[in-house]
């Protein structure tokens, strides 16, 4: 179960990154070029973000051996990363993306809706990129 969830969580990052990028581009087009608001693109980004949250919560509270509040956990780079840094960065990103979606959904005109999605999703995407344990960061995670 652990391996399955870990690989799902790891692989899903690529779909999520692609979906967020697409929603950001669509949001920009509505905001700057007056195109109709593309709600499905924002919704797909939101759903994938929340699926990633659910898998992350399972890993965090049930399966991952890398999460620990044991003595000296803040001194170990990998334990601190998964127990504190990854969690905080990703939760913040998820909150911002959720706010962006609900604001966009409620706006009457496409320009305002697109702007909300563009701004909130872009900040969320940057946070997610910063919070991912990319292989070159030496945190023991892979590309997939
Ligand atoms: C929403 C954006 C998120 C992305 C893109 C993301 C991405 C990743 C990636 C790429 C890994 C490395 C997996 C590997 O070993 O190859 C990972 C690990 C992990 N993530 Fe996330 N994550 C996200 C959110 C979260 C959240 C919100 C939580 C907790 C509530 C979480 C908990 C974990 C844990 C505990 C691990 C370590 C798994 C292990 O190797 O034991 N993630 N995440």
Image (cartoon, grey):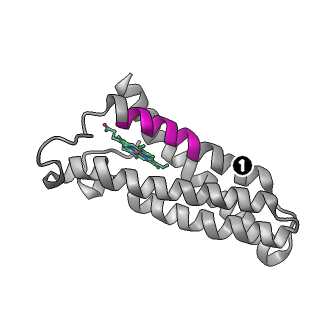
Residue 132 in view, yes or no:
no
Residues drawn in magenta: 49-60
Q: Quadrant of residue 33?
A: bottom right
Q: Quadrant of residue 90?
A: bottom left
Task: Please indicate whether residue 141 sits to the left or right of residue 112 in the image.
Answer: left
Q: How many marks?
A: 1
Quadrant location, ligand no. 1: top left
Q: Is residue 45 above or below residue 64?
A: below
Name the spot of residue 141 as percent of width and height, x first. Answer: 30, 45
Name the spot of residue 59 as percent of width and height, x first. Answer: 38, 34
Q: Is residue 3 above or below residue 42?
A: above
Residue at 22% x, 49% y is 78
Q: Quadrant of residue 131?
A: bottom left
Determine the main secondary structure of the stretch shown in magenta. helix
Residue at 68% x, 46% y is 44
Q: Is residue 81 magenta?
A: no
Task: Please indicate whether residue 21 sits to the left or right of residue 34 in the image.
Answer: left
Residue 8 in view, yes or no:
yes
Q: Secondary structure at mark 1?
A: helix
| Residue closer to the observer: 143 or 85 | 85
Task: Please indicate whether residue 10 sits to the left or right of residue 141 in the image.
Answer: right
Label 1 CA crowd tier, 10 Å (few <14, some 14–19, many 20+):
some
Residue at 35% x, 26% y is 2
Q: Which residue is mark 1?
A: 43
Task: Please indicate whether residue 122 sits to the left or right of residue 56 in the image.
Answer: right
Quadrant placement of the C terminus:
top left
Name the spot of residue 22 as percent of width and height, x first. Answer: 67, 58
Name the spot of residue 21 as percent of width and height, x first. Answer: 62, 60
Q: Is residue 56 magenta?
A: yes
């Amino acid at each position: 179960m652990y391996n399955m969830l870990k690989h799902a969580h790891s692989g899903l990052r690529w779909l999520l990154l692609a979906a967020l990028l697409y929603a950001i581009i669509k949001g920009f087009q509505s905001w700057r070029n007056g195109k109709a608001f593309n709600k499905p693109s924002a919704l797909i980004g939101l759903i994938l973000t929340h699926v990633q949250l659910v898998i992350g919560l399972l890993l965090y509270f049930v399966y991952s051996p890398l999460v620990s509040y044991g003595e000296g956990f803040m001194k170990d780079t990998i334990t601190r990363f998964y127990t504190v840094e990854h969690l905080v960065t990703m939760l913040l990103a998820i909150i911002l993306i959720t706010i962006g979606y609900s604001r966009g959904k409620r706006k009457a005109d496409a320009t305002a809706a697109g702007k909300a999605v563009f701004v909130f999703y872009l900040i969320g995407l940057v946070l997610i990129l910063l919070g991912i344990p990319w292989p070159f960061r030496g945190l023991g995670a892979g590309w997939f």
